[in-house]
Amino acid sequence: MSSPKVMVQGLCKVFGTNPKQALDMLAAGATKDEIFARTGQVVGVHDVSFDVQEGEIFVLMGLSGSGKSTLIRLINRLVDPTAGKVLIDGRDIVAARRSDLTALRRTDMSMVFQSFALMPQRSVLSNAAFGLEVAGVARKAREARAMTVLEQVGLAPFAHKLPAELSGGMQQRVGLARALAVNPSLMIMDEAFSALDPLKRKEMQNVLLQLQKEQRRTIMFVSHDLEEALRIGNRIAIMEGGCLVQLGTPQEIISRPSNDYVRAFFEGVDTSRYLTAGDLMQTDAVPLVRQLDAAGVAASLNGSADYAFVLDGERKIRGFVTRDALGQPSPPVAQVECIARSATLEHVVSRVVAHTRALPVVDDDGCYCGSVDRAVVLKAITRTRGSHV
């Protein structure tokens, strides 16, 4: 496995005149509030460590004052840390010279903020090309690149409009286009969609997910909205009082919240909507046949199972055989519908209710991963919806 895109190790930030005193008090067990009451020092981030993998959307969540925005500013060194390390592609950002940081921010790391921060007197095209202009790219080349990105976010027809002529959702698309134009390998998005109304917000999430499917960038996304985090995040890190209190996939956080603070985020949220076939599937519920002859089928169905899935040498599904076929020298293989591992619960329900047998779940390469049936789906829905129905 390749090394992480971003590595954060023991990161701390204390705002005040004597940060060492605050760190010593933290080490001795004092809380953030006690330190502030006794010294006036504010602990922004305390001893945070995590990795962000290449190509994932990593969501940083927490209430106001939890430290998530400070943490993101430590990662791009808009704020200098009190202690700890930040490595991006193996380079220590904390030890980097100002000139190296400037080059990194211009070419390899883009920011998208909650306030669209567009220049009102410049056209949409000129705004989208601004990062390339700062980097010294010739006008023709930068406008061609910006136009390509505006097409990707659905704004090409508005290239020569001014920002004031666009809706809030469109303005945020310009902000996204500007960040994408420099072709960064790391994007940092700080509450990027939270100023938008719910419909526009969902629309922008869809734009981001579609772009991510095509381009596979590494994205760090700050949000205080659990539904947004569950919808777009590959993994979610939850901050409380400057500390990282839980890190995991949406499914891990839904099924095993680490404390009451994390649990409180789920109040009134129907978390079952964010389950996928991969979350629901069982890996050993249906026998598998790899040798399609009477002996192979008999060996697979030696228990109480009525049917087995037939796999080829690459673990691809060929269909299923039933117990009725046991007496035949060359058992017939019936076709079976497969469900993608990433399929939503809604899709899984619609397919499972149409079949009496379990359905196989396959990965992006079509290889067998597990199976889902009516009982599995019913159990998942009743467990996660229990407090919301």
Image: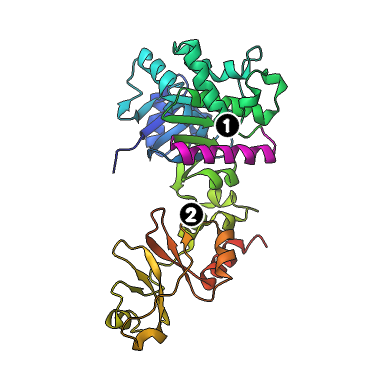
Horizontal and vertical percent position of residue 14: 45, 26
At a point 61% along the width and 24% down the height, the residue shown is 116
Give the labeled residue for mark 2: 342
Between 374 and 113, the one nearer to me in the picture: 374
Q: Secondary structure at mark 2?
A: loop
The quarter of the picture where the N terminus appears is: top left
Task: Decide: few, some or many residues near mark 1? Use Cα within 10 Å; few <14, some 14-19, many ≥20.
Answer: some
Give the labeled residue for mark 1: 153
Magenta range: 196-217
Between 168 and 30, the one nearer to me in the picture: 168
Q: CA distance from mark 1 to mark 2?
A: 24 Å
Between 219 and 40, the one nearer to me in the picture: 219
Horizontal and vertical percent position of residue 30: 44, 37
At a point 53% along the width and 40% down the height, the residue shown is 210
- Report whether residue 240 is seen: no
Task: Decide: few, some or many residues near mark 2? Use Cα within 10 Å; few <14, some 14-19, many ≥20.
Answer: some
